[in-house]
Image: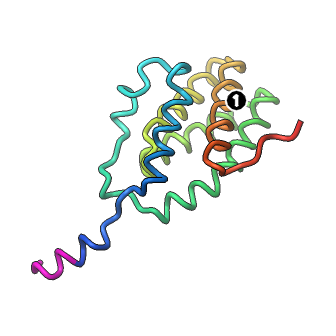
């Protein structure tokens, strides 16, 4: 690869935007008191900054409110399989979109659903809802 191609690649490098980085910090803050050793556990899911694609992040942000709504419905019904399905999806996507903490949250949802600890599932889902609201990605659930 020539120096000219290198500079073209650098100018189009995929980097997390400041908004994305703030969202990551906000996510960690939402779950720090809920999940022990969160940051340490999230490290295994972390991807290098240069791998992040802002387009994927945007699609993820648009879809997350639907996932949270589905999780709320599943929690209300104590639907183990639905909670595990959504948790597994979050676990896989978290690191790919630069939200390693979300991968830990997804794993925690799966674990709580398998153990039928519905209050834990609901608490984790409520934290997700609050985080989405702080990011402007969803409106608060209607009462």
Where, quadrant-wise, is the N terminus in this rendering? Answer: bottom left
Residue 104: x and y in percent read 48, 32
Residue 27: x and y in percent read 52, 37
Side (left or right) of 67 relative to 9:
right
Residue 86's place in the image compared with 15, above or below, is above
Q: Which residue is drawn at 75% across and 30% down?
A: 75
Q: Which residue is drawn at 43% across and 53% down?
A: 18
Magenta residues (range): 1-7
Which residue is label 1 attached to?
A: 80
Instruction: Label 1: state its secondary structure.
Output: helix
Q: Does the magenta stretch include residue 4?
A: yes
Residue 74's place in the image compared with 92, above or below, is above
Residue 124's place in the image compared with 134, above or below, is above
Q: Residue at x 33, y 57 (%)?
A: 51
Q: Which residue is drawn at 69% across and 49% down?
A: 65
Q: Nearer the viewer, residue 15 or 18?
A: 18
Where, quadrant-wise, is the C terminus in this rendering? Answer: top right
Residue 20: x and y in percent read 47, 52
Q: Which of 136 and 114 is in front in this view?
A: 136
What count of labels does the image hold?
A: 1
Indicate the quadrant where residue 14 lies: bottom left
Q: Residue lying at the far left in this picture: please name it.
A: 2
């Amino acid at each position: 690869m020539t120096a000219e191609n290198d500079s073209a690649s650098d100018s189009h490098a995929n980097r997390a935007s400041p908004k994305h980085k703030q969202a990551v910090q906000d996510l960690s803050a939402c779950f720090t008191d809920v999940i022990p050793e969160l940051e340490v556990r999230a490290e295994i899911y972390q991807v290098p900054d240069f791998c992040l694609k802002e387009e994927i992040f945007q699609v993820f942000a648009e879809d997350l409110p639907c996932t949270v709504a589905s999780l709320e419905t599943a929690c209300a019904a104590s639907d183990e399989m639905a909670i595990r399905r959504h948790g597994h999806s979050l676990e896989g996507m978290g690191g790919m979109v630069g939200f390693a903490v979300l991968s830990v949250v997804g794993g925690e949802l799966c674990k709580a659903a398998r153990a039928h600890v519905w209050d834990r599932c609901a608490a984790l889902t409520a934290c997700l809802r609050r985080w989405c609201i702080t990011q402007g990605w969803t409106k608060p659930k209607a009462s």
